[in-house]
Amino acid sequence: MALRTASISCFSFSSNLTLPLLYIPFSKASCSVRRPRPVYCAEAEGVSAKQSIVTPYSPFFTATITKKREHPNGIHDLSLFTNEEILEAPTTLEPLFPISLGELLQQSRLDPLTVYGDLNVRISGIQHDSREVVAGDLFICLVGSQTDGHEYLADAITKGAVAVVSDRELDKDLTFECQAVVIVEDTNLAIPILSSAFYGRPSKKLSVIGVTGTNGKTTTTHLIKSVYEAMGSRTGMLGTIGYYIHGDQHLEAPNTTPDSLLLQKLMAKMVDNGVKSVVMEASSHGLALGRCNEIDFNVAVFTNLTRDHLDFHVTEEEYKRSKGKLFERMLDPRRNRKVVNLDDPNAYYFLAQGNPDVPAVTFGMENKDADVQPVGFELSLFRTRVFVRTPKGTIEICSKLIGRYNIYNILAAVAVGIAVDAPMEAIVKGIEDVEGVPGRCELIDEKQSYAVIVDYAHTPDALSRLLDAARELGPKRIITVFGCGGQRDKGKRPLMTKIAAEKSDLTILTSDNPRNEDPMDILDDMLSGVGWTIKDYLQFGQSDCYPSLPNNHRIFLHEIRRVALRAAIAMGKEGDIVVVAGKGHETYQIEGDQKKFFDDREECREALKIVKKLQQDGADASEFPWWLPQRY
């Protein structure tokens, strides 16, 4: 479809490079809805208000006490019921009985520089966020990249913190109301040690599978979780999409890998609720920042390694070393296992980490030395059928996940099953039971004549794999819309545009969490991947004739993501695939310091409905959303 731009208002740019849209019927503003918070009545359970472990303000769970058990020999027993809601800033319930500071230091084996005050002071909780402090808490002053917990010490003490952990000497006037002060070399290293001891070292009571790599972690963890559940093991999951205590009950995930305190809380909650295994994404940030310290991993899984997060790690070598920290923990051949993608050039680096005597299971599609590999597969828009050869025989799997790259995720889950000696039927059932992963090659179906796929791909490699998978499905055209995040790795912006332009028939560049960067500056960086600048684009944007790329593909841009998505949807024709990349499951757009609700999946559904209505009314939708009759 030719897009006539000479008379299109949204390409008539003003001098400050804003992109006005005059006639688009935007959908109603979306917002998240909170249900009323549950109220726990301690008296109704025969427990006094003083004994109650759930405050009236606890927004996440209702609970009943089933048995009293003293800490630290065990964590409190709770029967947990979901409130069928996802809430932000997850917290968990604290142990019923406190522990003395002296006991905590002894059991944690932390070696403080100095301790002032009363070692017998009772600690009923640990916090590093002064806003969460309640009476009886131990407050740990963490020093982060943006904030210093020492600045909020007075607030924490005012709210009832009875003891403080710091990495520096403190003003006595400031800590006058505090009963104890512990000085350590590094509070960031101390918090996982203290929180693990406080919660009874829950990871030692679980079988913990850690998955690291640039791409595929989320889908792989979902598959592994399902395999373990097919084996009859109640399994939790921690990752990008959410923190799953067990089953479908989960909290929204602010980070792929929770901070070390929250991680110990969540695992303690899992133990309390009969969970036997937990699968977690071990991100490079989480490993580098020590969030996974004090986690007793049983299995380490490596998916792949490509460029990402260089805004944080600076070099690719440092990025790789951070990922390798997970495998450094594989030391005991009796209880540890390594699972590695042998097709990745870095495979042998990860295999060499830790104890070389730890058994390893490898997987791959290209390397014939892999223990787990496909001997045949069929791809379609609705399923993937793959025959997998393993050391225990060949199995057939019919998965609802689509795309060639998902075969790697399936192979990783099979390899984990082989590594832990899972029954073959459990491996097959577990993988086939996964209906899909939110925002991962997710099909948007409004009975249209072409496919719309929403995916989280936000790295060059992930976008390349996604578009290759789309091309293998045999579409007439691929229409791709994506953006690059602000205040993140700038080096990948031109790379992703080059990939999209080469592997798509039409490409629309847009914004994706610009944060405090000018969206037009981000688009300028992206356009450099095809040898353009914003100035070039504006020059040709007033003409019907856009300069063709070397392979005759076309490229457009719009800084408003909703407009770009609607343009891509409107361009779709029978047999096409529209690929919306970058956000996947995310339900927000960050502009400046504001986080606004935005869901690619809902936006696509809304656009499809509008196109359908236009077609039913006999209106010309060929230039939607660039121009529409005012009645729409």
Image (cartoon, helix red, strand yellow):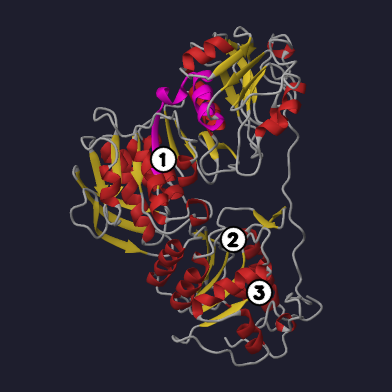
Start-end of magenta stretch: 187-211
Q: Position of residue 269 (x, y in %)?
A: 54, 25
Compare residues 313 and 386 and report the one nearer the observer. Answer: 313
Q: Which residue is mark 3?
A: 558
Of labels 1 and 2, earlier in sequence is: 1
Q: Which residue is mark 2?
A: 485
Q: Is residue 273 visible?
A: no
Farthest-out residue, right: 631
Q: Position of residue 500 (x, y in %)?
A: 48, 73
Q: Position of residue 462 (x, y in %)?
A: 44, 61
Of labels 2 and 3, earlier in sequence is: 2
Q: Main secondary structure of the magenta part?
A: helix
Three-letter amino acid code at the position of disc 1: Ser
Q: Which residue is mark 1?
A: 226
Above or below residue 113? Residue 6 is below
Of labels 1 and 3, earlier in sequence is: 1
- Is residue 209 located in the magenta-colored stretch of the structure? yes
Q: Is the residue marked by circle 3 packed among few (<14), some (14-19), or many (20+) residues within 10 Å?
A: many
Compare residues 515 and 262 and report the one nearer the observer. Answer: 515
Three-letter amino acid code at the position of disc 2: Gly
Q: Secondary structure at mark 3?
A: loop
Q: Quadrant of residue 546?
A: bottom right
Q: Is the residue marked by circle 2 packed among few (<14), some (14-19), or many (20+) residues within 10 Å?
A: many
